[in-house]
Image (spheres, rainbow, N blue to C red):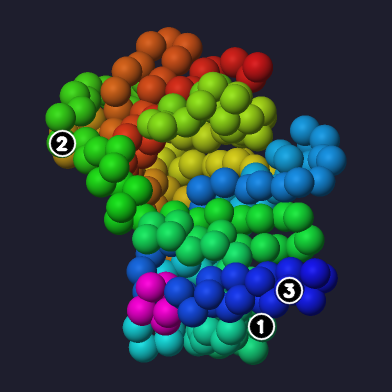
């Protein structure tokens, strides 16, 4: 009986491997959620989300990849062997992910025993939740209104449960953006600090951050008062509520 069971399990895992082809991995993938069957406290969960929350990887058909994690960028070569995805960066750093489940727009990796990382294919995720913001109404402001230290109090994103949004809020506690009146900004988010330049768009309805690496972040201004600021990040329905008071 044990031998029969072993054969069945072996056939099952081989069939999963056979379903994962190189062509299926090509595309833009981003962090969706972290799962574990282990006992883990809320602080541990927060730390895992903190580590992976901005993870994204672009896998190309010519075996190149670009990965972002904890705001650090990496690129190099990738390969697939027996359902295991291997990455080798241009600096020679190697990492690997065991694929335990593959669906059209979802990848499930086993990081450690009973710890799983779920990625979703970006294009399909965006289309499903209709994230384009052509219809979002912005307001015009002046530089003096924006020139304050703003603490993030809430992140508003579609298709998230109350529990997930609560976890995100806990994760972002103490995070802020300080828009200085001299056109400089300082950011502290998830223990990551960043400085650069900021200015308003021609219509004064968008804040533009210019990072030290010349990349830009665009914030559409939705509401502003003496104590609160509501921004939409870029061209996605990803909104952040800020307050001048740290909670």
Q: In the picture shown, does residue 127 fall above or below 119?
A: above
Return the x and y of residue 177 as percentages of the image width and height. Answer: 52, 35
**The furthest residue to the top:** 226
Task: For the residues labelled 2 and 3, say whether their Cβ atoms are less than 8 Å apart.
Answer: no
**Residue that label 1 marks:** 94
Return the x and y of residue 115 as percentages of the image width and height. Answer: 72, 55
Q: In this view of the protein, which residue sits in the foreground, 12 or 73? A: 12
Return the x and y of residue 108 as percentages of the image width and height. Answer: 56, 59
Q: Nearer the viewer, mark 2 or mark 3?
A: 3
Q: Main secondary structure of the magenta part?
A: helix
Q: Whole-Å distance between the Cαs marked 2 and 3?
A: 58 Å
Q: Is residue 182 visible?
A: yes
- Is residue 27 found left or right of 6 in the rendered image? left
SS state under label 1? strand
Return the x and y of residue 29 as percentages of the image width and height. Answer: 43, 61
**Residue that label 3 marks:** 4
Q: Nearer the viewer, mark 1 or mark 3?
A: 3
Q: How many labels, in total? A: 3
Q: Earlier in the sequence, mark 1 or mark 3?
A: 3
Q: In this view of the protein, which residue sits in the foreground, 133 or 234? A: 133
Region of the chain picked out in magenta, as a range: 21-25
**Residue that label 2 marks:** 134
**The furthest residue to the front:** 1
Q: In the picture shown, does residue 125 fall above or below 24?
A: above
Q: In the picture shown, does residue 88 fall above or below 115?
A: below
Q: Nearer the viewer, mark 1 or mark 2?
A: 1
- Dot 3 alpha-carbon crowd within 10 angstroms: few under 14, some 14 to 19, many 20 or more: few
Q: Residue at x 38, y 11 (%)?
A: 225
């Amino acid at each position: 009986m044990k031998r029969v069971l072993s054969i069945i399990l072996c056939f099952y895992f081989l069939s999963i491997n056979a379903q994962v082809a190189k062509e299926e991995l090509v595309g833009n993938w981003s962090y969706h959620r972290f799962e574990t069957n282990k006992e883990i406290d809320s602080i541990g969960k927060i730390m895992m989300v903190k580590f992976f929350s901005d993870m994204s990887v672009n896998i190309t058909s010519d075996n190149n990849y670009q990965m972002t994690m904890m705001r650090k960028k990496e690129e190099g070569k990738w390969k697939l062997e027996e359902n295991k995805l291997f990455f080798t960066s241009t600096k020679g750093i190697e990492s690997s992910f065991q694929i335990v489940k593959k669906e059209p727009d979802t990848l499930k990796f086993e990081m450690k025993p009973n710890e799983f990382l779920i990625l979703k294919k970006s294009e399909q995720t965006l289309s499903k939740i209709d994230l384009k913001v052509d219809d979002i109404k912005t307001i015009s402001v002046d530089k003096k209104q924006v020139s304050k230290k703003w603490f993030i109090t809430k992140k508003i994103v579609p298709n998230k449960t109350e529990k997930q949004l609560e976890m995100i809020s806990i994760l972002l506690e103490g995070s802020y953006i300080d828009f200085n009146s001299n056109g400089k900004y300082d950011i502290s988010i998830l223990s990551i600090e960043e400085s650069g330049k900021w200015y308003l768009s021609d219509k004064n309805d968008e804040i533009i951050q210019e990072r030290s690496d010349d990349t830009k972040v665009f914030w559409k201004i939705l509401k502003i008062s003496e104590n609160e600021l509501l921004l939409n990040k870029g061209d996605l329905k990803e909104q952040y509520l800020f307050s001048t008071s740290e909670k």
